[in-house]
Image (cartoon, rainbow, N blue to C red):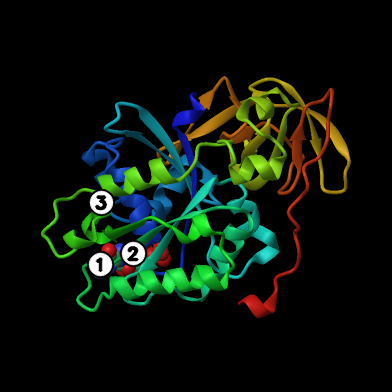
Amino acid sequence: MDHKHLRNVAVIAHVDHGKTTLTDQLLYQSGMFRSEELDKLAGGQHNLVLDTGDIERERGITITAKNCAVSYRHKDGHEYTINLIDTPGHADFGGEVERVLNMADGCLLVVDAFEGPMPQTRFVLGKALALGLKPVVVVNKIDKPNARPEEVVNEVFDLLGQLDAPDDALDFPVVYASAKNGWATADHDRIGEDHPDNIADLYDAILSHIPEPYAEGSARGAAAGFTSRQAALDSPLQLSVTSIQYSEYVGRIAVGRVTAGTITGGQKVTVINRAGEGSQQRVLKVNVFDGLSQREVASVSAGDICAVVGLDPIDIGDTIACPDDPSALPSVKIDEPTLSMM
Ligand code: GDP
């Protein structure tokens, strides 16, 4: 995979601001699904694919953190993969929000065009900024008669100021969207027009404003101590487990982002648990996300988000490391729920 054409994007929103509907449109309009397939998946509707429990049951997988990947052919002629990382907006049980955000190189901040930023917007955005992620702001539900997009954009700007965002994050791109009706525009003057079903401006904003993994000066590279993707690639394997899925056929599936090195189906690894104890294990196979499913690949490398099958024991916060040179990544703290955040 060419990492120049890969984007790892956390989707952030206060509950009901349209995260699910927007993610669904990003999948639907990518052209990855024929509409009959989508109809079947969504029980006759194009929306809320991600909330369809049937898909999860069909695959025998209990999804704890929802990931999906969109393949999109841009007008520049290149095919891009966009990993969309669903970020919980609720209270941060056990450091989950940070772990999930840690997989991303940037974020899509979805804000209701009438309600504006709400407590969960603030809470998750604060954590994203602390990790160096910059937002693409989606002012959603622009079709609502009481929408007040200009004020909402100003409120997002003020919120970023309150959260001590760096200057380049204050200079955020804005896309106005009606996820429900399947359209988006980056042009404020076109908000009131009749729109065809088209979110090309939203894909554009993601591809041009969210950096590829380990782009020069990117937050993730700096956090991991790598100045280039090549440096990350040349280092021994490290992958911090963000979530665990369970399949009745293959058991535990460890999902995370490869921080350094390469992981190959069939290879031996050392799994370092949070107590710092290592166990020698063998990877059965490595999957990447593909639409709403997973697809087996020979190997993945620094910057990829993947699902590793065949490791047990394995848990959230563990590091999958190279057996010859095992060292654990700093585990995002897994603490008790903080009541003040609920
Ligand atoms: P989530 O909780 O952020 O995932 O929000 P959902 O995607 O489930 O959307 C919450 C509600 O808002 C649903 O009833 C959607 O149909 C509705 N909704 C989502 N996007 C839009 C939009 O662009 N315009 C309007 N009017 N409603 C929307």
Mark 2 crowdedness (10 Å alpha carbons): few <14, some 14-19, many ≥20 = many
Front position in the image: 97 or 337: 97
Q: Nearer the viewer, mark 1 or mark 3?
A: 1
Q: Is residue 71 left or right of residue 342?
A: left
Tag 2–tag 1 contact (CB < 8 Å): yes
Residue 298: which quarter of the image? top right
At label 3, the amino acid type is: His
Task: State the residue position of label 3.
Answer: 46
Task: State the residue at coordinates (73%, 48%).
Answer: 317
Picture layout, residue 174 above or below residue 28: below
Work out whether residue 255 can be spotted. no
Location of the C terminus by quadrant is bottom right
Q: Is residue 106 left or right of residue 172?
A: right
At label 1, the amino acid type is: Ile
- The circle on residue 139 is 2
- The circle on residue 142 is 1
Q: Secondary structure at mark 1?
A: loop
Mark 1 crowdedness (10 Å alpha carbons): few <14, some 14-19, many ≥20 = many
Does the numbered disc 1 mark a residue whose Cβ is under 8 Å from ligand 1? yes
Front position in the image: 54 or 332: 332
Q: Is residue 9 left or right of residue 16?
A: right
Q: Secondary structure at mark 2?
A: strand
Ligand 1 quadrant assignment: bottom left
At label 2, the amino acid type is: Val
Q: Which mark is first along the chain, 3 or 1?
A: 3
**Residue 171, percent from left and from top:** 44, 58
Q: Secondary structure at mark 3?
A: loop
Figure disc tally: 3
Residue 58: which quarter of the image? top left
